[in-house]
Image (cartoon, rainbow, N blue to C red):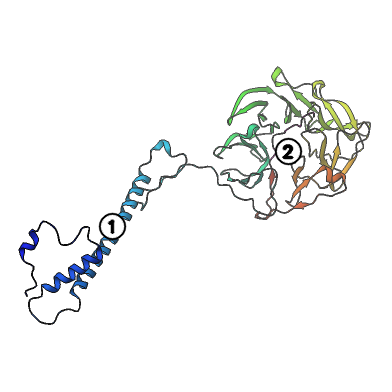
Amino acid sequence: MSGIRPAADNRTSSPERPFPVGEDELERALRETLSRRVDRPGPLRPDPAGDVLRRARRSGRRRALTGLALAGMATVLVTTGMAQLSEPGGREGTPTVVLGDPRGLSASPLPTAPTPVSRPGPVRAELDLLVGDVLDTSGGERRELTGVSGVERAQRIHDREGWLLTSAATAAGRTLWWVSAADGTPQVMLAVADAVAVSADGRQVAWRDGPDLVAAGVVAGQLIAPSRVAAPTGVVPVGFTGDDVLVSQPDRGGMSVWRRAMGGVPGATNPDVRAVYGTRPDGLVVGLVATGPARRPCLALLDPARDLTPTRTGCGPELAADGLGTVSPDGRWLLANGTGRTAVLINLAAPAGAPTAHPAGPRLVGTAAWTHAGAALHVDATGGLVRVKPDRVLAGERPTPSTLDGMAPGQRPVVVADTPVVPDGA
């Protein structure tokens, strides 16, 4: 028997095997067919049908792996195309990503907002701090202010539009920078100014320009609607009360008010006023005046509408003549230097009579600023940050400085004054 089925078998009307054929039946049929095709005796492979099946399975596995590889390459190519095909109007601050960085193409990052970071050191201040040319905000952002140096005072601008930074006096004068909250780029607004004063809300600036006093509004980094008036030698702006400028005459003593909105020159000088600390919500200016034949320095509430005439005077606290101090936004508290080795806290809302001065920790060596929570922050002679909370001071607590890590020797942070928020009913 030859093992070959007659040709007529394939022409029958009904197949011998039913369909569909299972894998096991197909394997048995393949083995039977191959065994019948062997015509002559001789050594055969142990399992020729198994070899064929194994080769088929290996071929299938290779095809599957090749398909997976091709699918992976297609995914990479599609991802690359999507990364490169981005329209300019849809970037929104995200840099263009180019996988592989082919020759002639490179990533082109767009300007982005400063990355928020934690403030160095154990103290996280409620107000912004400026250390050298680095501004650490109370919200945790860090901004490097290129070109800014020697800042003595710093003020937030209304609606948190940015900051105004005033340098210390140099042989060339003072510099005023405007820093936008949007991009943080410092812009010089004034240079070589003899003196600079900034309003508490950052909306107005006054300065000495040669023989003149000048005041202007601040809008988006621009000085607008300036007013200019000739002034005697040595007369400088020292602050604002509302829209009016407080003017000092250091050489001759005394202060006056320049109502620039009404035009003209500064009003009559009150020779008894030695310093001003700030303005209360009721419009009265808190100042230091000399009284009596001995010219004793006393605390006073001054009326700017009447050439800084005192409406109330208290000679109990011994206040230093340096004039360093600040009034709380609600007008209740004054933090100032005493004649001793400490700062003092005074309740301005106390009943008529001699106000009481409460020791309030290390002396001020620069400006102090109040937080919205009612605490005052300032820096002492060691560069430490001092936090003064009136309720704790009244309870007998003495504030102590907190060291800020990460500062170079000799560096002293500058506390940034925030725009005042007056409580309801103040």
Find disc 2 in the rendering and name its residue.
372
Residue at point 82% right, 37% down? 334
Q: Quadrant of the N terminus?
A: bottom left
Q: Is residue 84 left or right of residue 324?
A: left
Q: In this rendering, is residue 45 above or below 192?
A: below
Q: How many marks?
A: 2
Main secondary structure of the magenta stretch: loop
Q: What residue type is labelled 2?
A: His
Residue 276 image position (x, y, % from top left):
79, 33
Q: Is residue 270 visible?
A: no
Region in magenta = 416-426
Q: Which of 114 and 226 is in front in this view?
A: 114
Q: Is residue 90 visible?
A: yes
Q: Nearer the viewer, residue 64 or 304?
A: 64
| Separation of marks 2 and 1 at Cα, in angstroms | 66 Å
Q: Earlier in the sequence, mark 2 or mark 1?
A: 1
Q: Quadrant of the C terminus?
A: top right
Q: Which of 116 and 379 is in front in this view?
A: 116
Is 412 within the magenta? no
How many residues crowd mark 1 within 10 Å: few (<14), some (14–19), many (20+)?
A: few
Q: In this rendering, is residue 177 above or below 77?
A: above
Q: Determine which quarter of the picture holds residue 173.
A: top right
Helix, strand or loop for disc 2 = loop
Residue 281 image position (x, y, % from top left):
78, 28
Label drawn at residue 165: none
Q: Which amino acid does label 1 sit on?
A: Gly
How many residues crowd mark 2 within 10 Å: few (<14), some (14–19), many (20+)?
A: some
Find disc 1 in the rendering and name its residue.
67
Residue at point 31% right, 54% down? 71
Q: Is residue 100 left or right of residue 290?
A: left
Is 418 within the magenta? yes
